[in-house]
Each structure stands twice: as structure tokens, then as C-alpha cells.
Amino acid sequence: MGNQAARRHGLAANRIEVIMIRKTGPLRQVRPFSCGFTLALLLLLGACSQQPTINSETLSYDGAMPANLAGSWERDYSRGDDASLVLRRLYSQMSRAAQQRAAGGPYPGSSDVGISVKDASSIQALARLADEITRPDVLTISQNEYEISVSRKDDFAMLCEFFGGVSKGTDSPYGTEICGWDEDQLVSYLTLPDGLTVIHRFTISDDRNNLRVVTTVASTTSRLPFTLSRFYRRFEPASSEFNCIETLSMKRVCSTGEINP
Amino acid sequence: MIRRICMFVVLMCFGLPHAAAELNVSITVFDPGVPEDASTHRELLVFPKIRRIEALFLPFVLRKTIVETGGWGAVRVVPEPDIAAELLVTGTIIDSDGETLKLQVQAVDASGRVWIDNAYVGEWAGADSTSGRSGYQNLYDQITDDLGTARDASDSKVLEDVVEISRLRYAVQLAPSAFGDFLTTTPDGLFALNRLPAENDPMLERIERIRGVEYVITDTVDEKYQELYAEVARTYELWRKYRRKFAQYQIEEAQRQIHENSDAPRGSYEAIRGIYDNYRWDRMAAQEQEHWARGFDNEVGPAVQRMESRVAELEGWVDDQYAEWQRLLSEIFELETGLTD
């Protein structure tokens, strides 16, 4: 049943697409690969294709995780991108590119130098989605030796699992998540049906008090991806006089005394 | 020396009641069946801590069913396989997802004869709160029926031999020199009686009393599993209920996906938002299930820890006594026969 749903979205079961976005560069490539054979297939694709592929080195690391992002982070509204400004900048870029194409094209001086309605609409859709999924003002990141979880209000927790230093993706009929380490940046790749991808890149400051999250949303329906930067500051959640644990039958149980799960 | 004498006085106080036709059954705590590769657990929806609790808990449900059926001797849940058990039942949890419970169950008698070695699959049939019977009762009934069928297919002489072999295998563990040649091994690897000890063999009487003491401890351990069952059963049912809800949600969600007709143009905000939300809800549901798993573990964890700690104490006591019993019996054997172990 899940497979049927997946096929409807043009996503074969157990197959994911990965987009590699370099630190300094835009979207490079879309390539499908089987989740079970991630590394091998990526390397094979890289060898057989002129198109750049995901750097398989980001999907594994030696020793301890390159950075510790654990903590509670609140949005720093004084920094970061305004989605509408970024969108306007993109429109300008696209418009300039179109003008340049028109100037050097077969019909110089053509009046059709704007961006198409379709292009504008596609990029606007990406911008709106990027803005919405980066809206949560608090991120709670937990990290242990093999797992990083980024909890966000009203959204699923991003999950990065590394077993023996090798990334393990989360596969479902609705999409696939996999993480990697690009030096000390944690990169989360979410690949969804219909060529939609969401990539989050987490960078912690040297003093470990600031976190930058660069989110890129791309789609095969849009010629350009949309990227937004958000900044967060570390904060200590207010301590409560109650100690609480979650239970199954009584939900949240709190006590002023010590609770040992 | 006085301590040793006192110990034997204590041993003399315990008899070993037994009806030959009714075999005693030892059910070992199940193998949780958790895949070694931890990276597969999330994908396979295996919650190792909960599996470990199920491994302690499910044998007790089987025990209850066997006891209710009747026709058996003492039925006990034991932490480790007892190689001298008259009938030893072991099991592995293959799958347990709320809708389906799949167990691989093996029963072997003291002679080494395999009574059953089957996979049993139970589909949830709803819990009967008035009778307290498990929603997978059909599965336990089937196992119990198969055990009964295997027993009924054996004539009484075979069953009596099983009891005798069990007694002697236990005796061999404690005093190998005294009882080593009472048993033999058949070409197909089964234990068989070579000869029988005298009815009033004093060494065997001592060993039976020791076994009586061990049974008392085993019964105390069994009570601990019973207490755990009583303490955890309600929460466990709730966990299964949540898992069934999750499985049902996944089915309905997949159906919705198939029948959903989105009019949103490809690449539009509505279209990509829909794609993102499908994934979002799927992940949130899966993460909710993990949240329940943590809640279950938080709730029953202390009871499990208490039980395991008590069982470990009792087991430790038996292990310590075992060494002491072996030494004492060896000394007695030497005194009585002039032979050394």
C-alpha cells in the first residue's frame, strides 16, 4: 500500500533522491539512489556520470561526531534572512539573467526580458515553504554518540543516525531523510516525491552559543532553489520546581521530589 | 561442619512431591529477538527495551494458559534454561507490533526429544477485560494444544522415563561420579536410561532434597514473574493498543494517499506543501510511537528493575549453594565409597 502511494508520487519504494549542495554553491544535481546501497551506488553514479554527485565522504566520519549541537536554541530575530527580501533578490537575479540572455540571444532588444509567470510562481512556492518550515522559534537538539534529533514545534523532529560513523537514512513511502557531516557542519537532506528536497545545514559558532541554520528548498519544478538563513542563540530552559516524566497510562507525571524512570 | 550439618537438616525438610504422569514444565524467559544491528531497529519498529520486557512478560501468559489447561505438573517461568527440566519450553519473539504476535517456540523433554519447534502467529482478537484473557489467547492456546498433543502421543512409560532421566541429569550435574553411568546417549543424541539407581539410594535422596530446595527458589522466582505480570499487564495492553492505532493510522493514511485527488498544479505551493505535509505527518506519527515507547519504559521500568534485581539475588544464592552442594556431595560420595570425584 505504501509502495502504491510512493509510486503515485513518482518515488519508487526504497529509493531516494539526494541533492548535493556545496557550502558555497547552489544546487548541483539530482540523483536517485537506493537507500540500502547508498554509498556504493553514489560512488558508482559519480563514476559513470559527468554530473556531480553527493560527496559520499559527508555520509561518514571517523571517531567522535565533528560537532556537538546539543542544547536549546531560540531564534535570533535580529539576524537572518527575510524571505520576501530574498525572493525579491532572486527575482532580480532571474530578471537580469533573462535580460542578458535576451541581449546575447538571436533577437537582441527583444522586449521579453522578464521572468515567466511559471518561474515566479515556482520560486514563490519554494520561498513560502522554506519560510514556513523554518518558522519555529525554538529548536531543541539532543545528541548522543550515534544520533542527533532536532525537535521543532508543530513539525517532525529531524533525525540523524550514524552507526559506526556511517549515516543511516530514514526511509518511508513519503520521503527519505539522511544526514551527513560536511566538516563540522551537520547537513540534513530530506528528499520528497516529485523532486522536492529540503536541506538544512547546521553550523555552531566557535563559542558554541550561536547556531546558524541554512535551509534550501529545491524542486524539479523550479529552475532555482530557495535558500534562507536563520540564526539561533543558546538558552537555558527555565528550571521547574517539578520533576516530570512521560508515562503511557498517566501521560505526564510530575513531582516535587525525585522521579526515577 | 556444623553449618554443613544444618544445611542438610534444612534439606531434609523439603520433600519433592511429584506425579510421574504429569510432567513439570519449565518455561524459559523468551529471547527478545532484537536484531543485533541497531541501525535496523527503527526501520523494523523494534523497541529493544520493550522487547526485553515482553520477553519476561509473555512466558508468563503461556504459563497461565498451560496451568489452566491442566494435565501438567508444576509450570514455572525460569530465567535460564534448565537442562534437567522434565519439559523445557523456550521461545523467541519474532514479531510483536500490536496487530500481530509471532513466536518461535520449542519444547524439549529431558531426554532431548523435541516435542514442538514451530512458529506461532497470533492476530489481535481484542482483549476480554472480564476474563483477563490476552488478545492473542489463540496463540497461547495453540501452543498449549500442541504440547498436550505431543504428550498424549507418548505412552506413559516414555513419560515416566522422561521424569527419571530428568532426575538423573540433575544428579549428574551435582555428583557426576556417582551418577555418570546411569545415563547413556543414543546414536541420535538423545539421553536414555542405562540403569536405574536403587529406590532408596541415599545419594539420590540427598540430591532430590537439594532439587526440592532449588524448586522452592524457582517458585519464588516464578512468583516474581507473576508479580511483574500483574504490575505491567495493564500498561502493556495500553502499549499494544497504541501500536495498533499506529498501524491502523498507517493503513488509512496510505489509503488516503491513493484516493487523494489534488487539483493543485504541479510545483504550486499547495502541491509542494501537500508533499511536505505527507512526510511530516508520517514522521510525526512514527515519533509519537517512539514517545509512547519511552512512556511505557518509564512506567514499567522500575518494576522490571525491581524484579530483575530480586531474581538475580535468588539466582546468585542458588549458584553459590550449588558450588557448596557439589562439594559436600563429593565429600560424602568419597566417604561412602572410598572413590574420588
Image: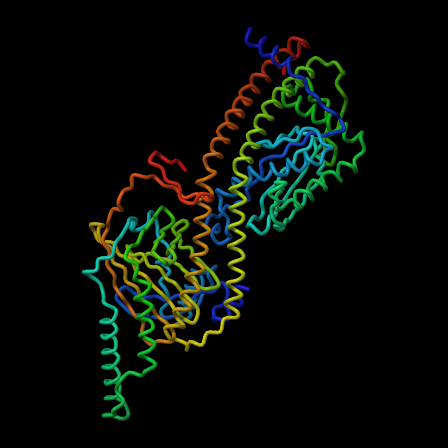
Residue ranking furthest to the front: B130
**Where A251 falls versus A13 (above or below)?**
above
Q: Position of residue A25 (x, y in %)?
A: 27, 68
Q: How many marks?
A: 0
Instruction: In this rendered view, identify the residue nearer to me: A58 or A179.
Output: A179
Residue for point 34% across, 34% down: A257
Q: Position of residue B228 (x, y in %)?
A: 53, 34
Residue ranking furthest to the top: B2
Q: Position of residue A123 (x, y in %)?
A: 31, 75
Quadrant of the image for the N terminus of chain B? top right
Instruction: In this rendered view, identify the residue nearer to me: B145 or B86.
Output: B145
Quadrant of the image for the C terminus of chain B? top right
Residue B287 falls left or right of residue B322: left
Residue for point 54% across, 26% down: B315
Please, which colouring scheme is shown? Answer: rainbow
Instruction: In this rendered view, identify the residue nearer to me: A182 or A141.
Output: A141
Q: Position of residue B179 (x, y in %)?
A: 69, 20
**Where B61 falls versus B42 (above or below)?**
above
